[in-house]
Amino acid sequence: MIQIPALGDSLLLTSPSILVFCVALAIMLIEAWARPESKSIFWALGFGGLLAAGALTALVHGMAEGGVDAYAGMLRIDRYGVFFQVCAILAGLLSLLMSDGYLERIGVRVGEYYALVLFGVLGMMLMSAANDLMMVFIALEVMSIAMYVLCALKRGDPKSVESGFKYFILGAFSSGVMLYGISFVYGAIGSTSLQALTAWFAAGHDAASNSLVVVGGGLLIVGFGFKVASVPFHMWAPDVYQGAPTSVTALMASGVKAASFAAFGRVVLGAMGEDAASWHGALWWMSALTMIVGNLGALVQDDLKRVLAYSSIAHAGYLLMAFVSIGPGGLAHSPALGSLLFYMLSYTFMNAGAFAVLSMFTRDGKDDSRIERLAGLGHDHPWIAAGLSICLLSLAGIPPTMGFVGKFYLFSAALQAGERNLAIIGAISAALGVYYYIRPMIWMYMRDGHPAVTIDRRAAFAVALCSAVMLILGLVPGTALDWAQDSLLSLAG
Amino acid sequence: MPSLLSLVTFLPIVGAAIVAALPERAAKSSALAVSVLAFLVSIPLWFQFDPNSAELFQLVEKMDWIPAFGVSYHVGIDGVSLLLILLTTVLTPIIVLAGFSGVDKNQRGYFALMLVLEGAMIGTFVALDTFLFYLFWELVLLPMYFLIGIWGGERRLYAAVKLFVYTIVGSLLMLVALIGLYVLHHQVEGTWTTDLGRLLALNIPYDTQLWMFACFALAFAIKVPMFPLHTWLPDAHVEAPTGGSVVLAGVMLKMGTYGFYRFAMPLFPEATMAFGPFLIALCVIGIVYGALVAMVQDDVKKLVAYSSVSHLGFVMLGLFALNPQGVAGSIYQMLNHGVSTGALFLLVGVLYERRHTRKIVDYGGLTKVVPLFAVAFMIVTLSSIGLPGTNGFVGEFMILLGAFQYAPIPTAIATTGVIFGATYMLWMFQRVMFGPLTNRANQTLTDLNAREIGYMAPLIVLIFVMGVFPQPFLDRINPSVNAFVARMEERFDGTPYLAAGGVPSWIGAASAAPAPAAAPHDDAPTHAAPPAHHAPAPDAASGAHGE
């Protein structure tokens, strides 16, 4: 007996996404008629739209307790999803803060940009709430197609075009892999609904007894692995991240990652969670290798954007650690999911803060994020340098920052589940990683020079906001922790 | 109104912000004012601390901090932390005063970082919550990294990065062990807590102790530093500005030995026994090796740096003797080393500021031109050697007395370190101070000025006071040391390990089931001296030195 909730409820529950969608459309419409000198309206519209969507999300959060199905079960609005939606909106807002000035400096000033960012965020929001494998796929495509275009936005710059092209080819390939996986799962259980998948596993089936599910689940994990840039599916990330406009990279590294992890978690931990043992080995190795390769790779980079690209790979590894740390007690009794959410939130901020600083480094209309460009920043612009330092220290997991609290939480989840060796691998690779996070500080504070940096007030605000959040939530993380723990219950329920 | 301990901890950090906010020309005076104020505020600690109290930790403050993790803001001091705090607050104004000359750029930054460093170091000594401790522990690293990296010498970047990476590797592994302990407490007791007192109450299975102790010990041994993890220290010392070297040798290295004393050893007593012989061997190697390497140095600062490796080897040796004399001597020697080596680095800094060289061959015959300096240098040198009447003697004597009861042969070998110590220090002194005044540049050297006398005098007074009247200090150390030794002993007379069923299997070795309840206990005495060895009455230490 399928119960179809009233369409009105569905509309209300998805109102943030609908709002983002409408604003994106409005921007495209206005773009067609707007005079060239009135372009700043797009920024205002996009930013305002995302802010309003954020406010609506707070409203939905109140209604979503325990989780409500919308659109006949295609979406499930629950606190878990809302948490990631907030991450996506935050990533969008922070990216927009650094966008306006940056786009002007690199000479790409088009209204579509804002529409595409909003479409990207829309995809992320839907992906966080998707409750059906088909919906996961559609949301993924909505998000990805917007990102492909955004990566290649600097049409005159071969690197940007390479980035977009590479992302498109590999992204399309991985989407294909995922779709193939979905078809196997459908073949095995006759439905693409996550509820049906949960029920199938709950009925005592496991992957070992059904080779279709093994293949399907495996391909799904591969597809998600591509999207979150985990080893061995990470090859695209450094080039794509480096070539894309910096504001887009910031959105990719935090928003896309958050949304992909949201769906990854909902499918692998939620729906297939009963059978976690079958996937444990693969995920364990993915996590360990991702941490090691990401951190080692970053060590030898001289371009900060590439450093942050490898760092984002390494962070995917830390986050994957939560996937193997569920332990025998199940989701509800494990700190793993809470640590995943908390870390995702802190990663959104610290990563965006670092990219916001990079977005100020342009020369002759091109990115110029080589590490030596930072020389003397600590002297010339002490506040920007301090902000970048705080974000980098947070990425490195050094107290008293939010990144440290996040790592503490992740490691305690891993040890709680008995993954001592994985925690030690994580600690050693994080220790290696500290080297590349403190290297920029050497340039900023210990070498002389005068950096050619354009202080962009909105981007500087983003840096200030992110570093303030890192420090405040590093010292008193209580609220954010409560929120993360409250949000996971809907999935664990 | 914050209570006293929090005030002492956070006053320098708040002061650092003030120094940073004031204009550059006010940097010196404001930093001096803050550091002196911090010292004045810390004096009442000495009087409020009651050595006869039954409470081991006094002036305790405790409140919830991150309830979701069971993390609390929990601070308190015993005699050991009391003295280490006072060492820190005494040294900081001296360092600030020494920094009035020689710091040629961005003085605001220099002094602000120095004050943050002071607050963070005090924080590590007062923290009674492992999370809080870890936070301060890491916080110490950052200012030191910047102090070396910005105000250091030629190869400062190399030295700063080396210091950072070495320390962080140990720290992160310690973090894993610390979280492991936190999780273990939850699995056994059902509550989440990072409170040291409650973690101490845990019975930790033997195999678990081994890996956790290894992680903790690695972090602390790097900080001490113990052979063979010491290689960051000479680089850091040579490149650091004078103030940085003083604080590094004076206080930061003690964080490592303090870490062993407060955390690694009491938390994992059986593992301490198991690793004991190995660590004692490293101590002895460090003592002799450090002394021999110091002997062949041509750079005064590097010589003092290697002498620190040797001296800290003694401190560790005393700790691992696990009897009241050894441990109390080791604590006392921590303070002594802070005073004497701090003073040595200050004096080397005085020379370096005048001549911009630290090579021994560039000097010679200085007694003739700088008599006051020569006297100060002589006193500090003798204190570092451990001449009776100076502080160094008391500590070294107690350590050797304690360690000999526990491990006679290694102690006998370690004693050669004392002889070598006298050799390299006196030989260096002779080459720098005596002989003909050959180098023309040295003829115009000026003697200590009023400011330099001002900051050397308290240290020289301390050298004699601590050498002649150790009792007030030992009175404060002993209750804590006795509790420490008692805890180590009590774990060897029959306290059962966790029953096999209660131990989550992962906590032991990856493959094996938890250690059988009795087996490790039967093993322990073979690693260790039997409890009878520890038997000398706890007040032997005060008795031996009472007269």
Image (spheres, grey):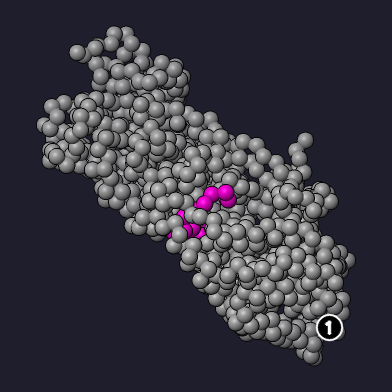
Q: In this view, does A483 lie to the left or right of B487?
A: left
Q: Which amino acid does label 1 sit on?
A: Thr
User: In front: A38, or A89?
Assistant: A89
Q: Give the range drawn in magenta.
A: B200-216
Quadrant in which the C terminus of chain A appears? top left
Say which residue appears at 12% left-offset and 32% top-offset: A188
Quadrant in which the N terminus of chain A appears? top left
Crowding near the residue tagged with mark 1, few <14, some 14–19, many ≥20 C-alpha atoms within 10 Å: many
Q: Mark 1 points at which residue?
A: B367
Say which residue appears at 55% left-offset and 76% top-offset: B281
Q: Residue A429 placed where, x, y %? A: 41, 55
Q: Is residue A209 left or right of residue B201?
A: left
Q: Residue A354 placed where, x, y %? A: 48, 43
Residue A295 visible somewhere in the drawing: no
Asked if the magenta segment contains residue B206, the reply would be yes
User: In front: A345, or A96?
Assistant: A345
- Overall secondary structure of the magenta section: helix
Q: In this view, does B136 lie to the left or right of B340?
A: left
Tell me the subunit letter for badge 1. Answer: B
Which corner quadrant of the image does residue B349 belong to? Answer: bottom right
Q: Residue B132 placed where, x, y %? A: 60, 46
Say which residue appears at 54% left-offset and 53% top-offset: A441
Residue B207 visible somewhere in the drawing: yes
Asked if residue A140 is positioned above or below residue B13 in the image, the reply reads above
Say which residue appears at 16% left-offset and 26% top-offset: A191
